[in-house]
Amino acid sequence: MLKIFFSASFVFFLFTTPVLAYLDPGTGNIIIQAILAFIATTITTLSFYWTKVKLFFLKFFKKEKIDKEKKTDL
């Protein structure tokens, strides 16, 4: 499978032709803005879910701690 991938990649890059394309400064600005927006969205989403995950584990370990205390009291 890996051999086929490298062979296909080699053939793909062997037969490429130059592209005459122009990227103006506005295009670079849009690309940077999209990358920063993706990073900000990812951090915000993770912070929302991190709170839920943290609360779940706090409840889980708190319950386990209470159960251990009950067992030692007996």
Image: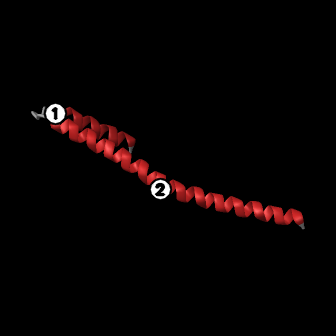
- Check the image and report above or below for 54 versus 40: below
Q: Quadrant of the C terminus?
A: bottom right
Query: In the current view of this chain or complex, which residue is farthest to the left?
Result: 20
The percent position of residue 28, horizontal first and vertical second, equals 21, 36
The residue mark sitting in front, 2 or 1, is: 2
Left or right position of 44 against 23: right
- Check the image and report above or below for 70 versus 45: below
Q: Quadrant of residue 31?
A: top left
The total of numbered circles placed on residues is 2
Q: Which residue is mark 1?
A: 25
Residue plotted at (38% across, 45% down): 1
Left or right position of 67 against 58: right
Check disc 2 and report its element: helix, strand or loop.
Answer: helix
The percent position of residue 3, horizontal first and vertical second, equals 36, 39
Q: Would residue 16 be seen by someone viewing this image from the given angle?
A: no
Query: In the current view of this chain or complex, which residue is farthest to the right?
Result: 74
Q: Quadrant of residue 36?
A: top left
Q: Name the image colouring.
A: secondary structure
Residue type at mark 1 is: Pro
Left or right position of 18 against 74: left
Left or right position of 30 against 36: left
Q: Residues within 10 Å of mark 2 (few under 14, many from 20)?
A: few
Residue plotted at (34% across, 47% down): 38
**Front residue (pair 36, 20):** 36
Q: CA distance from mark 2 to mark 1?
A: 35 Å
Residue type at mark 2 is: Phe
First in sequence: mark 2 or mark 1? 1
Q: Would residue 55 be seen by someone viewing this image from the given angle?
A: yes
Marks 2 and 1 in Cβ contact (< 8 Å): no
Residue plotted at (78% across, 65% down): 67
Q: Which residue is mark 2?
A: 48
- Check the image and report above or below for 36 versus 20: below
